[in-house]
Image (cartoon, rainbow, N blue to C red):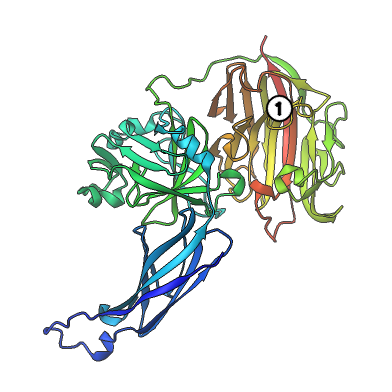
Amino acid sequence: MRFIYKILSITLIIISMISCQDDDNTLDQILVPQNLEVSLDITDDGSGNVTFTANAENAITYRFAFPDGSVVVAPNGIYQKRFTKTGLNTYQVTVLAYGKGGVTSSKLVEVTVQSDFSDPEAIELLTGGSSKTWYWAADVPNHLGVGPNNDDLSQNYFWAYFSFTDPFALNANPASSCAYDDEFIFSTTNGENLTYEQDNKGASFFNRSYASVAGGASPDDSCYEYTTAGEMGVSLAPSESVVAADRKRGTVMTLGDSGYVGYYIGTNEYEIISLTANRMVLRAVQGNDQGLAWYVILTATKPVEGSGPVAEEDTFPNLLWSDEFDANGAPDASKWTYDIGNGQVGWGNNEVQYYTDRSENVIIEDGVLKITARRENYMGQEFTSARLKTEGLQEFTFGRVEVRAKLPQGVGTWPAIWMLGADYQTNPWPGAGEIDIMEHVGRNQNEVLSTLHYPGNSGANGITESTTVSDVATTFHTYSVEWTETQIRFFVDDQLFHLFENDSTKPFDKDFFMILNVAMGGTLGGNVADSFTESSMEVDYVRVYQRN
């Protein structure tokens, strides 16, 4: 594909008038930028990326104004823009060079660029093939939250905004009383174009930093009367956030020039983290604070207060199976077997460890099972570790599983306590089902996850929740799941943080077996820190209880 750009007009010079009262101004202060030149580096890979490089004599900063309404200041004159409209399209971009005293020179640049990105499945799920209305998932914990827009280990990946565990927490806050009336409508006429309209019933919930947009001045987040922009076009593009590839869909949507989703934070760009026919998780970076990423959970079925899932109370008095790890040495061969090697494509996740059954990687000492990941060259891999399982030895349907453990630390570690459907060899993943009681990644040291994978909800679309545990690597905590015909409930130290409605249409009604492992790297673990040498997951006990 050949790409063309034309310089349509050369140097429109705007000279600010000098006040007659400003006797101290000198010619040096109002030098007009001269000889503004703009070069373009247009990718030929269909990504739609164009790098603009502006240079002018006497310029101290530059600004780029794009046809989608975005305006970007680039002090060094260099900026990369992704044009997302599918196909070969021509855009006009205004480039301004600013000199001292506010004088400018400008140039209009025409750029023709190819973008091949498309996500027809997202359009189908968003619109149902024509038009679909979405709502706040008010009955789901964590339906509005905020986290850092980076992978700094000193910060948690996700912070709750109103409440981390209480459904309808947003509604309980008087300042946000208008939020749950919102309707978010996505439509298409041909399966290719996509439009968006927000019906806010006349009022919207605003971040305090943007109160002035609605004519308000509250020092706190508040609801204000506000008229939305009506139906607008939506463009889709590849997402490029710091979220690990395995935890996002890979698509970002731009909602016209002034679109937003329920909570006004000064941006119209929302990354789709996960998307199914009835559930959508969005991520957006706050417009005036690029360090903050907000998370919104929407549903296509409007929740009714008081009708959300309620944790059932069950008792599991019968100990079915356990390992207390009381005997030093290798794990009990009547209870545990191993996965050995690196599997296919790093166990399907691009993991970089080689699993062994050596004492260097798995051993019981002083009443504790230790699974140790080590940096060492072994069988063509840079790391070793271990993965224990009860496959063929202990498999069960329903019950309460408790595992008391202390987790490893180090960027790139990926420990897990989980269960896999015992029929996985004849019913390949995700058909067999997967119940992740606890997952953790070293780059988000104080966050633990629980996830369910099954057809339609696997990989980045797994049904997942997270909670904060401040000392996972220094203190033992009890990670548990209660699994019944109607619910799967996840706990840390007996505190419920994830509730899943189970039924016979899902593959969680048959035998599963236990797995304990520490992976390294991979799609969720991420790059391993150069400083990592070794670290262990320590397990005090594993216990499985069942009802009478």
Amino acid carrying mark 1 in the image? Ala
Return the x and y of residue 230 as percentages of the image width and height. 28, 42
Q: Residue at x 62, y 42 (%)?
A: 472
The mark total stands at 1
Q: Residue 249 occupies which quadrant of the picture?
A: top right
Return the x and y of residue 453 as percentages of the image width and height. 63, 32
Q: Which is more toward the observer, 403 or 248?
A: 248
Up-down relation of residue 366 to residue 4 (above or below): above
Q: Residue 420 occupies which quadrant of the picture?
A: top right
Q: Which is more toward the observer, 480 or 352?
A: 352
Position of the C terminus, as image quadrant, is: top right
Residue that sits furthest to the left in the current view: 20
Up-down relation of residue 327 to residue 14 (above or below): above
Residue that sits furthest to the top in the current view: 548
Mark 1 Cα within 10 Å, few/some/many (few <14, many 20+)? many
**SS at badge 1:** loop
Q: Residue 484 occupies which quadrant of the picture?
A: top right
**Drawn side of residue 24 relative to residue 386, left or right:** left
Q: Mark 1 points at which residue?
A: 432
Residue that sits furthest to the bottom in the current view: 27
Q: Which is more toward the observer, 25 or 54?
A: 54
On the question of residue 472 being in view, the answer is yes
Position of the N terminus, as image quadrant, is: bottom right
On the question of residue 408 being in view, the answer is no
Return the x and y of residue 293 as percentages of the image width and height. 45, 49
Return the x and y of residue 152 as percentages of the image width and height. 55, 55
**Drawn side of residue 83 relative to residue 210, left or right:** right
Q: Which is more toward the observer, 213 or 2?
A: 2
Q: Which residue is drawn at 34% across and 42% down?
A: 263
Up-down relation of residue 538 to residue 293 (above or below): above
